[in-house]
Image (spheres, rainbow, N blue to C red):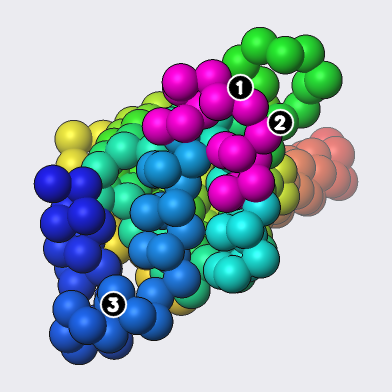
């Protein structure tokens, strides 16, 4: 059942996927997931050494490093995948998409929960770093090269370093398209500039009123 979900997700999220044989033979993201499932099963049985060795072998073969303790849901798709790192206590929900260079890393040396949790249907763009025991809400999108250090509510888009959250209320964000992602920093600058122009107009109007008052005062003085 898990393999079927993985193959179905590959067809859904990768327009370059042509046939099942190609997916089975030439998709390192699928290979890494399948090897991880075996390693994770052995990890839960507390088999020594072998789970880590399988993880190491998968990294050598695919360029994707998934700790055998990580929990990976159904239908997850790792596209290209080179340089992806998923830590021991990370949790990835169903139907998540992870692009190359992504790190789901820790920010603590404590042995407890120290890696992020991705809820269902999260997309993490190329090169993004999601760090610490935080939660990325379902149906959220993490932009390319974003650095996320705080939890993110569902239906959000996160961009920038550090990550800035733009909440999308009541609907799912559009599919990850880096040329169409919002830029909260630029939007804030636009608001500041708009307010600055408004203040400049108000100051100009006040100067006109003061100048007019002075002219009238001089006229009255001369008339007297």
Disc 3 residue crowd, few under 14, some 14–19, many 20+, Cα 10 Å: some
Q: CA distance from mark 2 to mark 3?
A: 31 Å
Residue 46: say if magenta: yes
Q: CA distance from mark 2 to mark 1?
A: 7 Å
Q: Which residue is mark 2?
A: 106
Residue 64 x/y as whole percent: 59, 60
Q: Is residue 63 above or below residue 149?
A: below
Q: Which residue is mark 3?
A: 23
Disc 2 residue crowd, few under 14, some 14–19, many 20+, Cα 10 Å: many
For the stretch drawn in magenta, the main secondary structure is helix
Residue 61 x/y as whole percent: 59, 69
| Res 213 seen here | yes
Quarter holding the C terminus is top right
Ranked by sequence position, the earlier of labels 2 and 1 is 2
* Residue in the picture at 18% in, 35% down: 170
- Work out whether residue 120 or residue 171 is closer to the camera in this orientation and state it: 120
Residue 114: say if magenta: no
Q: CA distance from mark 1 to mark 3?
A: 33 Å
- Work out whether residue 132 or residue 192 is closer to the camera in this orientation and state it: 132
* Residue in the picture at 47% in, 31% down: 42
Q: Which residue is mark 1?
A: 133
Contact flag, marks 2 and 3 (Cβ < 8 Å): no
* Residue in the picture at 29% in, 62% down: 175
Residue 174 x/y as whole percent: 27, 59
Q: Secondary structure at mark 1?
A: loop
| Res 219 seen here | no
In the image, taking residue 145 as reference, residue 109 lies left or right, namely right
Q: Secondary structure at mark 2?
A: loop
- Work out whether residue 220 or residue 41 is closer to the camera in this orientation and state it: 41
Magenta segment, which residues?
Answer: 41-55
The quarter holding residue 190 reads bottom right
């Amino acid at each position: 059942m898990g393999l079927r979900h993985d193959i179905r997700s590959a067809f859904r999220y990768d327009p370059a996927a042509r046939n099942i044989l190609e997916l089975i033979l030439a998709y390192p993201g699928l290979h890494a997931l399948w090897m991880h499932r075996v390693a994770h099963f052995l990890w839960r049985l507390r088999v020594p050494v072998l789970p880590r060795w399988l993880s190491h072998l998968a990294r050598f073969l695919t360029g994707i490093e998934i700790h055998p303790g990580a929990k990976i849901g159904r239908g997850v798709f790792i596209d290209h995948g080179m340089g992806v790192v998923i830590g021991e206590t990370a949790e990835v929900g169903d139907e998540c998409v992870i692009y190359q260079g992504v790190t789901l890393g820790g920010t603590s040396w404590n042995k407890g929960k120290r890696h992020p949790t991705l809820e269902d249907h999260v997309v993490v763009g190329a090169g993004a770093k999601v760090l610490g025991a935080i939660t990325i809400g379902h149906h959220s999108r993490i932009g390319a090269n974003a650095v996320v250090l705080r939890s993110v509510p569902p239906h959000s888009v996160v961009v920038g370093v550090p990550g800035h959250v733009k909440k999308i209320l009541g609907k799912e964000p559009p599919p990850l398209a880096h040329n169409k992602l919002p830029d909260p920093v630029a939007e804030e600058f636009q608001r500041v500039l708009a307010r600055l122009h408004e203040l400049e107009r108000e100051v100009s109007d006040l100067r006109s009123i003061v100048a007019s008052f002075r002219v009238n005062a001089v006229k009255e003085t001369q008339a007297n």
